[in-house]
Image: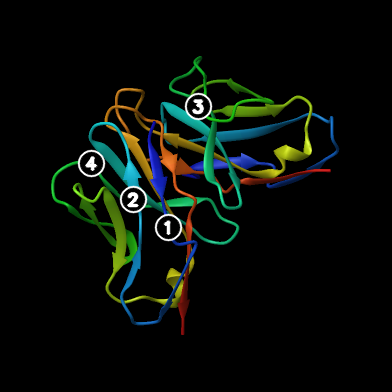
Amino acid sequence: AQSVAQPEDQVNVAEGNPLTVKCTYSVSGNPYLFWYVQYPNRGLQFLLKYITGDNLVKGSYGFEAEFNKSQTSFHLKKPSALVSDSALYFCAVSPFGNEKLTFGTGTRLTIIP
Amino acid sequence: NAGVTQTPKFQVLKTGQSMTLQCAQDMNHNSMYWYRQDPGMGLRLIYYSASEGTTDKGEVPNGYNVSRLNKREFSLRLESAAPSQTSVYFCASSERDYSSTDTQYFGPGTRLTVL
């Protein structure tokens, strides 16, 4: 069975600093990996995904994520944080060829002005 | 193009009452999903439907039933609500069927409280 770990419940970053939200996964075979963001009282919004190819994936709002197969990680990054990036972030994984996603428990990102 | 819509947005039930959560998508997607979100537990899949007329259990199906009424609509029914079903419920849809993983698009959620 697949699983996702987001080791940090809360991440605080000063505005303008780089940010990283961590994600590690466990899955049989090649993974499909996703990042979603949830703003208060809203549904989840898709940010980016890794299917195959280049290990660095670029997504919405200036976010990117790096797939590292040897470390089974898919960390979310942004070079310069904005206050508007404050939200709850979810990593999700699915085995290749299976549409059922498994979500992590989420990381609350707070950008401090 | 509204994407995925859910009704109602909020609901309070008493233990033992029944209700149906409605979900509709206008993206002509094949697959639809129901999740529940609980603090510290992320999202957990309740049921999903790969196509019209088919439904399958997810991780936490007990206490729920679903109906894929047509390609657009996928409803979730609580026959006898319990306090443990207090949660935020999200509906999602994706374009493809079982053959591959595709991006899922989420509705705004229904916040359900069972007293």
The residue at which mark 3 appears reads as B48
The residue at which mark 2 appears reads as A24
Up the image or down, B17 lies above or below A67; here it is above
Mark 2 and mark 1 lie on one chain; the one further toward the N terminus is: 1
Which secondary structure, mark 2?
A: strand
Task: Measure how far apart labels 4 and 1 are at the Cα level.
Answer: 23 Å
Q: CB atoms at circles 3 and 4 under 8 Å apart? A: no
Up the image or down, A9 lies above or below A14; here it is above
Task: Measure how far apart labels 3 and 1 are at the Cα level.
Answer: 28 Å
Up the image or down, B76 lies above or below A107; here it is above
| Residue A7: assigned label | 1
Task: Measure how far apart labels 3 and 4 are at the Cα level.
Answer: 22 Å
Q: CB atoms at circles 3 and 1 under 8 Å apart? A: no
Task: Measure how far apart labels 2 and 1 are at the Cα level.
Answer: 8 Å
Q: Amino acid at mark 4?
A: Ile
**Which of labels 3 and 1 is toward the front?**
1
Q: CB atoms at circles 2 and 1 under 8 Å apart? A: yes
Query: Chain under label 1?
Result: A
